[in-house]
Image: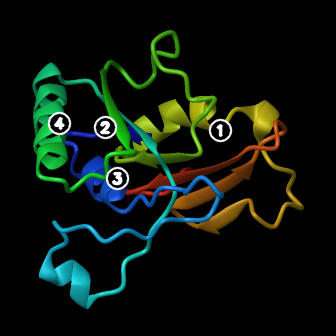
Amino acid sequence: YDVGCGDGRVLIQMASRSIPFSSDGSSEETSNNSTTSSQQSSPTQHHYCKQFIGIEISPERAEEARSNIQHAQETNQIPSHVSIEIICANALDTDLIDYSRATVIFLYLVPRGLRLIKPIVWPKEDAPDSSDDDQTATPTELIIRQKSNMCRRVITYMSPFE
């Protein structure tokens, strides 16, 4: 999930690095003809995500993100196994947005926004014990092992959670 996805650039960048699993469960490191020379010259970290969700409160920015994603799909920057959905809504509206299945949440929010969304993306019932070594990766990244046994990574861009 990319909360405050704006024009969709983070979603496109992350989706472009997704590698599909083959039918035997191994990764398929297929070459992408649209890889730029800068991508070829530096090592790229890949992952196996296939679904990305962007949340944007501004209808104009949400439409811009959809347009940019469509262009990236048409020019094969995004692998065909990947889907990206843009939700135009307030990220705090839990009637419209279900964070329960999110494994990674990227937050490009000012400190006030982080304070408001923290109880939603890191509910008290899923908060790790203080003895949990995976609780904090960096000041701007939390790794949360939920009681449901699902792990969630929460990354903030502008400032850490308070």
First in sequence: mark 3 or mark 2? 2
Q: Residue at x 17, y 32 (%)?
A: 66
Q: Which residue is mark 1?
A: 122
Label 3: how many residues lie within 10 Å, few (<14), some (14-19) or many (20+)? many
Helix, strand, or loop for circle 2? loop
- Mark 3–mark 2 distance (CA, rounded to whole Å): 17 Å
Apparent side of residue 105 relative to residue 57 in the rendered image (left or right): right
Helix, strand, or loop for circle 4? helix
Percent coordinates x, y for residue 142 in the rendering: 62, 56
- Mark 1–mark 2 distance (CA, rounded to whole Å): 17 Å
Q: Are marks 3 and 2 in contact (CB under 8 Å)?
A: no
Helix, strand, or loop for circle 1? loop
Q: Which mark is residue 15?
A: 3
Apparent side of residue 84 relative to residue 151 in the rendered image (left or right): left
- Identify residue type, mark 1: Trp
State the residue in front, 22 or 51.
Answer: 22
Q: Is residue 121 visible?
A: yes
Label 2: how many residues lie within 10 Å, few (<14), some (14-19) or many (20+)? many
Q: Is residue 106 above or below residue 130?
A: above
First in sequence: mark 1 or mark 3? 3
Q: Which residue is mark 2?
A: 4
Q: Are marks 1 and 4 in contact (CB under 8 Å)?
A: no
Q: Residue at x 37, y 68 (%)?
A: 30
Q: Which residue is mark 4?
A: 65
State the residue in front, 110 or 97.
Answer: 97
- Identify residue type, mark 3: Ala
